[in-house]
Image: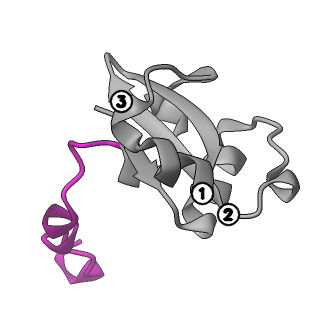
Amino acid sequence: MMIAERDIKRIKEFFELSDNDFSLRKYHKPVLVYEVADDKVRYSLWEADILERFGLKNVDGWDKTENVAFCPDWMRDDVDEDDLDDIDLDDDDL
């Protein structure tokens, strides 16, 4: 299932980590549409009004594929924010 990310900071973070040259300047309101499958992220950029007009359910393709290791944590399903709170950062135990 494709997921739409509208947060511009997250979109920029994705492209910085994946080291791809996408020019966001040509988009008025960019939306990153992606799908995580088999340790790969398949994605494309859409203009928000076009995506709203045709709907996310009608997106059936992608422009590029990236290894999930080079993508932000928020794209992966297996990262749970609550698990990060359980990490003990105190150096007293050492």
Labelled disc at residue 36: 3
SS at mark 3 in the image: strand
Mark 1 Cα within 10 Å, few/some/many (few <14, many 20+)?
few
Label whose residue precedes the other's in the sequence (1 or 2): 2
Label whose residue precedes the other's in the sequence (1 or 3): 3
Is residue 87 at all visible to an observer of this figure? yes
| Left or right of 91, for residue 87 | left
Quadrant assignment, res 12? bottom right
Question: What residue would you read off at disc 1?
Answer: 49
Labelled disc at residue 8: none
Magenta span covers which residues? 76-94
Q: Amino acid at mark 1?
A: Asp
Q: Amino acid at mark 3?
A: Val
* Along the line of sight, the residue nearer the viewer: 50 or 74: 50
Question: What residue would you read off at disc 2?
Answer: 29
Q: Amino acid at mark 2?
A: Lys
Marks 1/3 in contact by CB < 8 Å: the verdict is no
Label whose residue precedes the other's in the sequence (3 or 2): 2
SS at mark 2 in the image: loop
Marks 1/2 in contact by CB < 8 Å: the verdict is yes
Q: Residue at x 85, y 47 (%)?
A: 23
How far apart marks 1 and 3 lie (CA) works out to: 24 Å
Q: Point out residue 41 in the picture as x, y percentages from the top left corner.
A: 46, 28
Q: Nearer the viewer, mark 3 or mark 2?
A: 2
* Along the line of sight, the residue nearer the viewer: 6 or 40: 6
Is residue 73 at all visible to an observer of this figure? no
